[in-house]
Image (cartoon, rainbow, N blue to C red):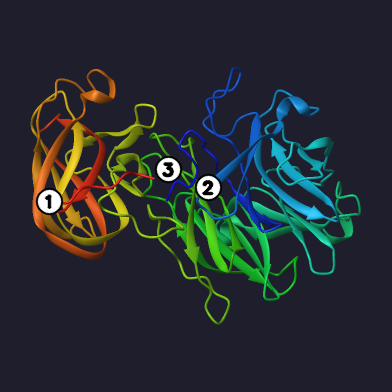
Amino acid sequence: MNPVLPLHHRVPDVEARVFDGRLYLYGSYDKNADPPFDIHYCSQEYHVFSTADLQEFTDHGIGMQAGWTPSPNTLLYAPDCVKVGDTYHLFWASSCGREWAAQCATPGGPFSNVEEIHLPVSQIDPAVLVDDDGAVYYYWGQFQCHGARMLPGLRAIDPATYQASLLDEMAHGFHEGASIRKINGLYYLVYTDVSGGRATRLSYATAASPLGPFTKRGVIIDCVDCDFESWNNHGSIVEFQGQWYVCYHRSSMCREGMRRLCMEKIAFGPDGSIAQVEMTTQGPGAPLQPRTPLPAVYACLLRGKVRMAGSERYLARFEHGSGAAYKYFDFAGEDHFRATCASLFAGCRLRLRLDAWDGELLGETPIPCTGGWMTGGIDGFIPVTLDHRPVHGRHAVFLEAVCSENRFFNLQEFVFERHGEPTSVQK
């Protein structure tokens, strides 16, 4: 289910790598930075996560922190990790404008022996490719994607191979966030694409050789509607247990930061193209079970100024016309909807639709005055219910607020039921 990791782990910019049958996740780590930093993005540490089944994830702890580097008072930006020989090499940029590498005998870290990467232009977001012949290539940059083959030792590039602009913002929408893979002899460069007006698209370009020329092919996913303040996206593609996935992130809490890892299945066409996919709540797993209570914060689409709030316990500020969407549920005749809501005032109704903001209307229910937005903590939320026609099959759920002026409510969770049958327990 998306977000993939527990909500207290805010991990964007993920490079997903498979080592010894496990999927390892290397990303930035968003949290409230200590002074002197006043920034939404990143922090002074990385955590490495891994999984054998995309259900249970292991937190390997702090894999790197700024205090272990020659620049201890910096933020750690997006990393990548590759295995060369028997050693795992972690690469990253920091807020001081320098790029680094460290190493470890195991993929979960902690990484050590930090050294600076010597580059003609130091920017952000390193990505590394180990080609079939053992050659290692380094990609990085903002507004322009730079690339070069690395020298032995993996701490510098061969200047004779340096390419200053494999992709750029004007021609390709390249903003930042390069990620590189080789698939069936073709090189795929995934990147943050700003051509839609915000840097919310993950797009890709392909080439017959590691240093191009690259041709833009299309968009893989766009997270523009995940949060009112959503700004960027950054991720990677990975094959795990025979299925390809895109890893991306979504903003939350009505901030450009506080970004969270999400995943979706992707598929390749016979010409090597990747079909664009949508954001979902179900993510890489099976459709959601409607009789399992679902916390409202797992919405995959938000409209209006609705945002995660209350230490990630509920969605706040459902005002007139705003809403949240959840994709997808596997319905089996459910005919009753129950949600827990809180509001200081009366004057709002919760409207339930299927499949689209203007999809089939199942009904709406009034939100009473509960005495506060969350009076007495989480116990301030009270249930509201709605009977509707039996629903069968795979559907998305769209929840919309219909409110008088200056009225709004908060939503904690919801569940579907069939009269006379019990609900299940969230897992």
Q: Position of residue 379 (x, y in %)?
A: 24, 24
Mark 2 or mark 1: which is in front? 1
- Badge 1 local density, few (<14 within 10 Å), some, or many (20+)? few
Which mark is first along the chain, 3 or 1? 3
3D distance between C-alphas at marks 2 and 1:
33 Å
Residue at position x 44%, y 52% in the image: 197
> Which residue is at the far bottom?
270
Answer with mark 2 or mark 1, whichever residue precedes in sequence. Answer: 2
Amino acid marked by disc 3: Ser
| Badge 2: residue crowd in 10 Å (few <14, some 14–19, many ≥20) | few
Residue 217, image x and y in percent? 55, 70
Residue at 80% across, 69% down: 132
Does residue 388 appear in the picture of this structure? yes
| Residue located beneath label 2 in the image | 56
Q: Marks 2 and 1: CB-CB under 8 Å?
A: no
Q: Which mark is residue 420?
A: 1
Q: Label for residue 113?
A: none
- Place of residue 361 in the rendered image (x, y in percent of width and height, measured from the top left): 12, 56
Give whichever of discs 2 and 3 has the lower sequence position: 2
Answer with left or right where residue 355 lies relative to residue 129: left
* Image spot of residue 156 (x, y percent): 86, 48
Amino acid under disc 2:
Glu
Q: Which quadrant holds residue 95?
A: top right
Horizontal side of residue 288 vs 160, given as left or right: left
The residue tagged 3 is 230
